[in-house]
Structures are given as C-alpha cells and as structure tokens.
Amino acid sequence: MDGACFRETLRTRRRWPDVMAIWKKDIRIALEEERHVRANDRDYNERFSYADNRIKTAKYNVFTFLPINLFEQFQRFANAYFLVLLILQLIPEISSLSWFTTIVPLVLVLAITAVKDATDDYFRHKSDQQVNTRQSQVLIKGKLQNEKWMNVRVGDIIKLENNQFVAADLLLLSSSEPYGLCYIETAELDGETNLKVRQALTVTSDLGDDVAKLADFSGEVICEPPNNKLDKFTGTLCWKDNKYSLDNEKMLLRGCVLRNTEWCFGLVIFAGLQTKLMQNCGRTKFKRTSIDKLMNTLVLWIFGFLICMGIILAIGNTIWEQKVGSDFWEYLQWKELTINAVFSGFLTFWSYIIILNTVVPISLYVSVEVLRLGHSYFINWDRRMYYSRKDTPAEARTTTLNEELGQVEFIFSDKTGTLTQNIMVFNKCSINGKTYGDVYDEFGHKVDITKQKTPCVDFSFNPLMDRKFRFHDSSLVEAIKLEEPLVQEFFRLLALCHTIMPEERNEGELVYQAQSPDEGALVTAARNFGFVFRSRTPETITLYEMGQAVTYQLLAILDFNNVRKRMSVIVRNPKGQLKLYSKGADTILFDRLDPSNEELMFTTSEHLNEFAGEGLRTLALAYKDLDEDVFDEWMKKLLFASTALDNREEKLGALYEEIEQGMLLLGATAIEDKLQEGVPETIACLTLANIKIWVLTGDKLETAMNIGYSCNMLRDDMNTVFIISGHTMLEVQQELRTAKEKIMGPSKDKFSSGLDMEKTELYSSDSVFEETIIAEYALIINGHSLAHALEADLEQILVDVACLCKTVICCRVTPLQKALVVELIKRHKRAVTLAIGDGANDVSMIKTAHIGVGISGQEGMQAVLASDYSFAQFRYLQRLLLVHGRWSYHRMCNFLCYFFYKNFAFTLVHFWYGFLCGFSAQTVYDQWFITLFNIVYTSLPVLAMGLFDQDVNEQYSLRFPNLYRPGQLNQLFNKRKFFTCTLQGVCTSFILFFIPYGAFMTAVRDDGAHISDQQTFAVTIATSLVIVVSVQIGLDTNYWTAVNHFFIWGSLAVYFAILFAMHSDGIFTIFPNQFPFIGTARNSLNQKIVWLVILLTTVVCIMPMVAVRFIKADLYPTQTDKVRLLQQATRKQGPQEQNLRRVRRTSSRRSAYAFAHQQGYGELITSGKNMKVPTSSTSTYPLYSPTRGLTGTSSVKNSGVNDTTRDQTETYSTGFRRESDQSQEVTVEDLEAR
Amino acid sequence: MGKKQAGTGPLSRRPDNSAFKQQRLPAWSPSLTPQTVLPTFYILSLVCLLLGIWLLITVEYTYELKVDYTDAGTCEQCFNLRKHAIDSSTPCKCTVSFHVPKTFPRVSFQHDVVRLSARCLPQGDVFFYYGLRNFHQNLRRYMDSRDDAQMVGRKNNLKAPSSYCAPFDYDANGKPIAPCGAVANSMFNDSLTVMYNPTDGSKIQVPLYRKGIAWYTDKNVKFRNPPTNNTFSLQQAFEGTTRPLYWQRPVYELDDIDSNNNGFINDDLIVWMREAAFPNFKKLYGVLNRAQGPFTEGLPAGNYTLSINYNFPVEPFRGRKELVISMVTWFGGQNYFLPIAYLVTSGLILVTAVVLTTVFVKVGKKGKNMEE
C-alpha cells in the first residue's frame, strides 16, 4: 500500500543516505516545540509552515539529477580517488598516462551508477505520484470536496470511509459507530492484523456526520511535535473554553486502514513527512558485509602499498637522475630536466601513482555490485523458493548482503508465524473416553494422514460449513448424526464458550474474528460439525444446531486470564436450563471435576498424553448444570464484587472459582499448532551445517518447549534441558553457573572450574573445544531471567552456556530483548547472525542482525519491510543459506581473489620496468590497453564466473551441509588469501616482464629488422598477460556454462580484434598522435619469437598454480574437493535418487495448554459496546470504560517483565489474526523444479 | 512444467522455469584430476624440452660478432673531440680494424627450414647493426618527445609541432623544427663503412643494402613526407622548417645518393624513431649485398677495417657504440635466453611432475581422502 515508507527505507539503505535531508528535518523538529492546530482555519495553521501532505521520496528532478547525482557519486571514496588521478593526469610534467585511460572507465562507472540511480528515482517518482494523487474527502468551506492527498493540510477535517487508507495522522472526531468508536487495522504500521479500537472524545463524537457542525468546529489542538513514537501521543484539545486531554487512543495514523466502520471524521494533526509512519522510516542502518569491510581495509592497504612503491620508485628516480640521467639530459641539452634530481623524484612519485593506480581497480566496486545484483536476481527467480499457495516468490530486498548468506553462524528465529504457521487446526478430540481423529485401515492399523491421499470427511450436510476445514475421521460425523448427547454437548460447548465476534458478510459466509487462533479453530470445528455459532448480542448467543436456530441467553462470561487458565460461560438454553460451560488447561480443570468423573478422567488423561506425544495442544472441556437459586445468589455476589473499588480482580477470581466446581468432564480437544512445512528437516539440516538456531519467542515457556520438541530441537535423549527462570539476578546467575558446571563437568580435569573471564572466552570461542562436548544440552531461558542475564555482569556466562548448548530457546522475550540477544552474539562471537521473523515484534531483531529475513505472504508487512530477504516459508531458509548463500560467498571470494591477482599481475609490470627505464614512469603497455584491460578484456569472464560458478551443484550443497563450514570460518577470502593472491599476481608480473625482457634483449626479427623496440615489447607482454589471466580464469571456473565459454573466448577474440584495429592504418591516419602503435601488432605477432615468448610465459605463470592446487587437493582435500569428486563420480553413473533426510518427531512430552496471553474481550461483549445497537444508547456511558477490556488488568499478572516492554509483548501475541489459507502446499512445482 | 501454467492468474508471480533463471544451465565442470594433470605435466615438459633443444641447436649454429669502436683504434681522438658540444660540427673520421674468425655462411644450416618458413627473406643473410649501450631511448619524457602527426607529413604539424616536442619544437629563431622532438634530434648519425682486407692486401668495400631495413608499415604508413604534388621539390615542401639542433643536414638531404630515401621516409630515421625498449640495443644498419665478389657466399673470414664518420657523441652519457655483425635464425637473432629458458622450464616441470606423481601414488591415492 503506502509504499513510501518502504521506499524510504530502501533509499537510506543505499549507502550515503540523505543525511542532509534528515538533518534538515531534525532542525525543523528542534524548532517546533509544540504544535498548534486549529480546525478549519487554514490561515492560522499556515503561519507555522507545517509540512503538507505531499510525500516526496524521490531525490532528483530532471534538472537537479546530474549535479546532485555526480556530487553524491564523487563522495564515494573510489570515485573521488579517480577524479584526483584525472586531475593529476592533466599536469604534463606528471602525466604518465593520457587522460583517457582514466576518464573512459570513470565515465563508464559513473554512467552505470547514474542509470541505476535514475531508474530507481523514476520509480520513486511514479509511486510518489500515485500516493499523492489518492483521493480523500476534505471539508472545505463547509462542503465535502474530493481532494488529492497532497493537497490535504494540517487542520483540515477529512472524512474516511470503510476500508480506506488513512491519509494523514488524524485526531478522530466522530464515527458511524456508537460511542465514537472506530476500528482500524495497523498492519502497515506494526504488522498486527488484528483490529484495534479507537474512540473519539464525547464532545466531538456528538458532531456526528453533520457537515455544518463539523465546519463550525474550531477546536485547537496543542500537542507534541512530530516524532516517531507510534504508540504515544499527548496533546490537549481546547474547544469552547474547555480542555480535553488527548492520547493515542484517539489518533488514526497514516498507513492504517479503516475497518468495520462506515465512516469517520478526523482532524489532520500531522501530514506528509511529519506523520508517524514517515518519521518511522529511514532509520535503518546501512548494513555492510564483512567482505565489504575487509575489502575497504584491503583497498586502504593497497593504497599504502601503492604509495610505498611510489616512494621506492621516486627514490630510485632521484638516484638514477643523479648518477645517469643528468648526463643524458645534459647531452640532449634538455635544460628543464637537468635541474634537480629530487624534484624529478617528486614528480616521478606522482607519475607512478598514476601509472600504478590500476592496482586499486576502478571497476572493483561496480563489478561487486553487479555480482550482488545478479545473485539477488537468482534468489528472486528461484522457483524452489516460490510459494505457490500465496503466489509469493522469494525476494532479495537488499542487494548488498548476498555473500554474507554463506557465512551465517547463528540464526535467531521467531516462533509464531515463522516456525509455525500460526494456524491452529482442530486435529483430534476425546469425547467421553473415546478418541476421534485417527484413521484406521481395514486391518485396524493407523494410517498416516497425508494431505491428499486420505479422504476427508464430507460436511456437505451442513450448508454453513467452512470449506477449508479438514477432518479425516468420519466416525465423529456419524456420532453427530446419531445425535449422541455428549458429542452434541461437546460441540455445543465449543460453540458457546468463547469470545469470538462473528461477522456475516453475506448469507452463510461467516467470518470469525478470534482473539486467539486456538479459539478460532475450536469454534470452526464446532461449526463444521453442525453447531454453527452464528451471531451474538450482549445478552444472547445464537447457534444453528444441525440447521436449527437456537438462541441461548448469555448470563456471564468468566473470562480467561493467565492465572485461571480457563474460561467459562453461563448460559440459559431455550428450555430454561442453566448451564456452565468451561474449557481450560487439563490440570486446572481436572482439579475442579466432580469426583464421579474419576474414571473418565483417567481415560481422558491417557488420551491427552497421546495427543501431547504428537505435539498437539490440548484443552479439557467440562460442563455443569446450575441451580437457579445458587446462580441467583452467585450473580448477586458477582454484581457486588464487580462494583468493588479495591481488590476487585481478586474478589471476582474467588467468585469464579466458587462456581467452577464439581463440573462434569466432557472430553478434550487436541489442536495442532501447525508447523510450517519442512521445519524439522530444515532445522536438522541447518544444524548439520553447524549453524546454531536460537528460538526467540514471545510465547510462554510451555508453548515454546512444545514447539522445540516438535521441531526436533529438543529431544528426549538430550542430556539435560536447562531451564533458567530465576526472578532475581542472583538466582539467574546461580542457575547459569550450575548449568555451566554441569556441562563442563566431564572435562573438569582439563578446565578448572574457576575459569576467569578471558579464559572462558578463549575456550568458548574455540570451536574445537565446543565440539569436544559430545553430550547435548539445551537451554531454555525465560524473559524475565533474560533481562537479568543480559546485564553486563552476566552476559559473558550467558554466552558461554548458550554456546555450549545445542539448542537455545528464549521465551517470553520482548522485541527489544530479541534485538539485545542478537546484539550480544554479534559482540561476543564475531559471527554472522541472521534473524528471521514475520511480525512487527521481530523488526528490531531483523534490523539488528547482520541479515534480516522476513516471512512474507502474511498480512503484516512490517517484518518484510525491515528485512533484507523475504520469502514465504521457513524451510526456504535452507536453500537461501546452503545454496544461494554458499554460492554467493564462493563466487564473491573467487571473484575478489582473481580480481586482485589480475590487477597486480597487470600493474606491477610497470614496477619492474622502472628499473630499466630510469624510473621515468614509462608505461610498458599501450595506453589503450591500460584503458581497456579492466573494463573490456578481462571483466566479462570474471563476471561470468562470479555470476554462474558452482563448485558443487545444488543437490550436493544441500546433501552435504558441512560444505557450509568454510564460509563460517571465513576461509575463502581473508587477509591471508589476499596476500596469496596478490603474491601470485606479483610473481606473475615478474615472469611476465622478465621472460620477454630476457628474450628481447638480443632478439631481432627473422628478417633482421629489430623488434626489441618498446612497442613490440608492449604488445608481447600485453598479449601474454591477456592469455595468462584468461587461462587463470579458466582454471578458477568450475562451471563452464555457454556464457563462460562465450565470455572467455570472446574476451580473447575481442582483445585481438581491438589490438589489430588500434594498430591499423586507418585509425592511425585519422589520429596519428593517439594511435602511434600502427602496424606493431602485424609486425610482431607474425614473429615466431613473440609466440615462443608468450608460450613460455604462459607455461611458467600457470603451471606452478596447477601444481599447487593439485597437490593441495590431493594431500589436504577440503570438503568441497571431496564432494566434487563424489559428484563427478556419480555423474558418470547417472543421477542417483537423493536420500531425503527424514526427521521423525519423537517426544513423549506432555504438551502444554496454550491460550492467548491476554484477557479476553468478555467485558466488551457483555457490555455490548462493540456491538451495533441503536444509537439511542449513546447518550450515557462512562468515559474510558469501553476500552478497558482491551488493555485491561490481565497484564498485572505477568510478573517479572518490566513495564516498558510488557505492553509490546501483549499486543503482538494476541489478536484477530486472519489466516486465509491453511492447507499445505504440496509442491508440484517443487518437484518439477528438480 | 507448463502443466500449471494455464492458471496464470494465481501463479502470476511465479518465476520462469528457464535453465538460466534456475541456475541449471548445462555446463562443463572440469577439475584437476590426476588423470588430466599428470599427463599434462609430462607432455608439457617434453614439449619444452624439444623446443629448447631445437632452439639451442639453432642458436649454436648462428654467429654474431661485436666490434666496439667507441674509443678503439684511431677513434680515440674522435671520441675525445666529441666530448665537447662546441666541436660537434667538426668532422672526424677514424678506422678500427677487426677480424672475422669464421665465415658468416650465406645460408644457415637449417637450410630446409629456412627455405620453407622464410621465403621472403631479404637477399642477404648477414646483417650489420649499430649498437648503443647506456642510451636511454625508453625514458618517458624522451619517448614522448616526438610528433607522429608531423612525421606522417601533416602540413599543420610541420609548421606547428606538437607541444610534446618541447623544447625541441622551435629553434632559437622560432622556426619549427622538422622532425621535431628529442628522439629525432638525437638520431644516430655515424656512418659506417666496412672494408674487407683479403690476404692479398687489397681493400674491398663490403657492399650493404641501406634500404629496406625498416618495417614495411613504418616506411609506407607511419612515415610520410609532406605532399609535394610532383610540382615542387621535397626541399620546398619542408620550407619554413629548420633541421634539428644536432643534425648536420636538413631532413630532406639525409641520403645524398637516393633522393627517394629523403625526408621523413629515410630508412635510418625510421629505424631510429622506433624507440628501443631497453638502454642497450642494436639497430639495423645494413644488409650484406651478396651480388658480387667474395660476398656471394656470405661474409668471408678474414681481416676487416671499419671506417667511421664519427659524429655521434657517447661520452657525455658514458655510453658505448659498437658494430654488430650477425646472422638471423628462424626465430630471430642470436639468442641464448630462449633455449635455456625452455630447457630450464622443461626440467622444472619434469621435477614437479615427478613430485606430483610420487605424492599422488604414495599419499593421496583416490579413495583414502574420499571419506567424509
């Protein structure tokens, strides 16, 4: 939708962000201390020159493009460097190369970048335009007029209609709903797809939709200046001499969508770039990869090296001038050159800086960017990362991090929506001691339920069914059809006992807005089995029981909270019977059952164990018939308690407890918290790749552990699962110490228990040490303990223990803590971290980690917008890292090695020549060759290698996850590697120079004419160089596609073509001074001696490399070598069936009860405030109370989590998540994609 | 693959299933296996060995003679005279005698090879070079100090030489110099005459071809005289220019015998203008004319006298001058570097190959390191 924010993010992410703009913005903010907005008074508001509602994310227009873009580009170090070189070259005394040798590549580089920037900006313009011209209804001069968004001003009153985007940050004035309520969806802002309620002030909501009244409204808002806090707003409204305080509950922020509300009016407070949405954008740090940083260091080193060489040669020149040169110049009577040897040395220094500048390859940065762009496209194009169900391909949203994907050591994963689908599926149930849900074949064996083969139960008898619901055991339907009373009661309970709001858009098209997905699943199950929850009013619930409308009177909702772990409703059925229906955690309910139920309880308990073993989430259901008198009595007490001023919660709790006694057990439900497909396999595979996966979740300990078991991260055969849940610093410390001692115990003789900090770090960072611990441990840490553990004193021991454990799960963590954990590992382990998540709560972690991955295809976009990569399924992570990441890293490293090698080999020839040409900065090559070498003759083969190379194909990459190891250890490109390849370059340049030198000293042509002239020498060396580096790239290329062939052979062909063209008669007669090499190619390349020299040079340069590589692969084969060998061996035999790694879930753990963390909507329902009722009741109601149900008192129960972070935890983990499509994708495409 | 393509609506964002986009392009992935590497090494070693031997034999049969005449014989006085720039215009002649111990044969031993490969050989197998030592034709400022546009006969550049020629672009009177620049200015201007002294006491001048010693492209494309239109003489074409400072004659009078060899297309000038890559170099001076006398079979052994018009000073930059008489081989001049380099390379490759084989057989034989 409002792509502006995303684009803003992108823009800032692209290197040098508009610091200027942000700076300017800051100044404006600094100036504005308080905002005064008067409604319907443009003249007044214009005095403050607030930003208007036009969004401008584009940087340039037609006229400013060139200057600004060039200015920006020259701020890049490399470009500026080449500009300086260019200027140096214009000084004739220094200029050792013509200006075109630099300007041609520089212009090319600048042009490529400029074109890219221009296209980016064009799209920004287009989408700006699209956003700015959206229509909204603005109240101008007492009339509602359609205006473009960009013409909306601060202080305007605008009208919004259902499902419209909010155009600016508005103060809600009035709405179509009672009490001035209105509902918004904030997915764009915080990723939450549940509806939020906003409520207008009474005084303003009385204005209604009376345009005249609204036009007369002249309230003045005094509020905070623009800021980026999405959840805070403070201000006051002054109107008719009264002051009303304003908070966030009255604000509609830009980016929200109006839902379930016919219309509403709002007063524009912040517009355009000053809206909270826009203020929230562009804070993203620009991420750089470690290779990037290394590259920058290396480039600096190369500069140092360049200057050293310049100094050596300059000193050489000074000495030479004194001893030899001065005589020569004197003999020539060249006065200006005989003056001063030191000055000559000084000039020579600069000349050599110019000549040798090619060691810092101008095309390096551009090439690297091109490669990364290419790799990103390969990610975008990958069909095996395309999720057909949601039509979502994988997307590389940043093009700068690809090779880092091959170096990941830690993955921090969110749980809900990432590992799990956040879809709850009613999977099994136990009713009155009988289980339903399993399918048996004719021999009585359990059949594995696979998605397609097993037939589903036919619910066609029920016109109101949910088509997506699937159930395989038909015996339950039969039981329903036989009208077994307990089965009916079971589903009746499910249909009645909940806080869901139904929405019936068309006849029979029911949508449930559930607070927790569990509830949704249960009610949907009841719906399909013929107990359709159709509608509710504050006092009634209407069901369609097997087609019959039945209305129950709702007498009380005994709502859920974290302590009670159950909820109940008390209803009166049409027959007048009073019933209490209750569902809740089995342990809680079993304590409150009637003693007569004991036998059933045991059976059910067994079933529950069975369900838990399969990783299902369970709830027990019970009911109770109530006596009219008892209930009346209780009800009175309840009313009394609910008006109590102190300890109301406790009193209510006690009353609830009182009535929920002696219930009769109905059965139990088992809900599958559906894991995303392939999650256990992916985790197993990534673990084999030595990637540590930490789960950071806001969920409860039990839920998190449950998922841990079902993902195979926790197993029964693990030695110990440490659970850290201390409430004080000391407790946490003690628990961590114990854990550490236990782990270190077996090896105590080696590592004394009294390890000091540094030692520990030494050990823990030593991977060998880590691997010696064969036993498997797991660490589970609670949010409040984590808060202590993250403090400076404990973080070291936390890192130690965590890294010794196979599995780490942090539960109950806040978004901030997620980021802190990532930060902790980044600081202590110097490892590459990856964070993956889907919700707004993961944004901080995604932004903190080196690589952020967002799960896309969900409704919330926040995580995706903040991420660097996004795809629809967790399992694609395996492919992203092990295939794309590994390839990217491998390609980038080979590319860099070769690039540095090539440029050293190319450039250092000048250094050697210096010793023979009196250090006069004479070039060896033709100037055109220097110009074209990097950008034409050698760029494409290495680019082709960098784009297409595959050392090991994708199947083998996935089959041998330990191939990922070199990336983590940073083995393929590091400082040592850099030295080796530059050394190779230096040696090559040495050979390249001295073999032709030796041969040419005395050589003549076969017709006696001389060829030891500089031009022939240049052509010979240049040709040898091009051939040597081409052979070298051939050696480096593991995967010769047609493109590689084309580029490698093509480059050679192009070299000779250009060589002959530049040495041709025609071009010489046109520009005699620019092309003095006329005829050299013809006259030298027809000489046998030249070819003998080229052959010898090539052999001497290449063979040592071949020998070294061969012997390395033979003596110390890397994993890659081995797999390559295997791959080649098997290729000869033809493709083999891949042995798919099957991970079986084995867990006998009893699963936990999972429910929403937040108190339900019970109060809101019973008070009827969120129902559409005749507006007559608008007149009297207590201020503020309607929203209490939402942000109510339950949070107090979450002890230990500190106040500031708690709110966040609460809001993201609940809500009406709407999942459109839940069935699994079986991927024909996947299989096709081979 | 196209099966699901029908429903393009819901799958509209599905990436194409092309081999390119899916990175499944058919490819050849070679690797360094012992089966390919070891034979390559042995074969390369053999090839280098054969080439090396061939080159060595060739070189062994060729012959080169150097006569350093800088201050030898009677040239010492000229050498001293040329120390001072003031006396540069004073002519000085001297002679140096030398002995050729062995006949330079007309045709080298590898008769057939030469016949096959070098039908276009010029009519003489003995080449006379002048050699200079310590003369830095490869200094940047020196090399750049020329104007190719002028030398190709462009009128504009003739009158207004390129700034690269400075300070050798205009003389003291502001007249443009043709040819301009330091390179042309410092042209080698000794003239050498070799006299054969047979045992009978007579003196026969060794006849030399002084033309056809430059590259064809240089002579015919790179260097052109300013247009004369057949109506006026070369001198007129060069009118308004002056000769370089060190030259005794103007450019249009370089060759007083052959008028077609004058101006920018003078062979000696062209040869000189092809700047040497190293400070020690030799440049072709002439080719033995085997048309007559004792020279039909090559340059006979015996005593010779070299008489020199000693103009080129070398003392100021401590250089040396020499006459080099040489034969050519099929791959160029007398050159020991290449054969030896090939032989050494061959040996090294062989050693490496043996080491690699040993390592492969003893340590790294397949299978052992294949294990995971």
Image (cartoon, rainbow, N blue to C red):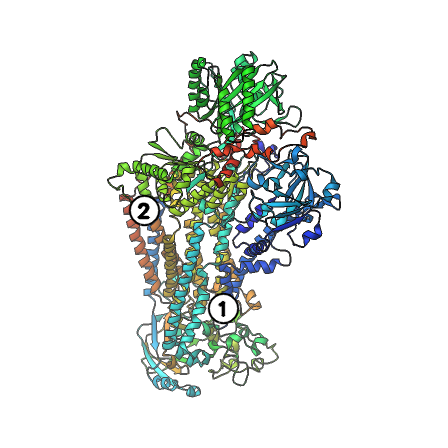
In this view, the residue in front, A315 or A831, is A831
Q: Is residue B336 above or below residue A453?
A: below
Count the marks: how many?
Answer: 2
**Nearer to us: label 2 or label 1:** 2
**Chain that bears disc 2:** A
Q: Of the residues shown, which amino acid type is indicated by label 2?
A: Met
Q: Residue furthest left?
A: A749
Query: Which secondary structure, mark 1?
Result: helix
For residue B20, say whether it is visible: no
Dot 2 falls on a residue whose secondary structure is: helix
Determine whether A902 is above or below B183 in the image. above
The numbered disc on residue A88 is 1
Please tell me if label 2 and label 1 are on a single chain: yes
Give the letter of the chain under mark 1: A
Residue denoted by label 2 = A757
Q: Position of residue A176 (x, y in %)?
A: 68, 35
Q: Position of residue A1101 (x, y in %)?
A: 37, 56
Label 1 sits on what residue type?
Answer: Leu
Residue A734 as seen in the image, left or right of residue A122 = left
Q: Nearer the viewer, residue B181 or B324?
A: B181
Q: Are marks 2 and 1 in contact (CB under 8 Å)?
A: no
| Residue shown at 49% from the left, 40% from the top | A842
User: From mark 2 to mark 1, how far is it between C-alphas?
Assistant: 54 Å
User: Who's the residue at 67% across and 33% down the image?
Assistant: A177
Q: Is residue A441 above or below residue A191?
A: above
Identify which residue, A758 or B19, lies in the foreground: A758
Mark 1 residue crowding within 10 angstroms, few (<14) / some (14–19) / many (20+): many
Crowding near pointer 2: few (<14 within 10 Å), some, many (20+)?
A: few
Q: Earlier in the sequence, mark 2 or mark 1?
A: 1
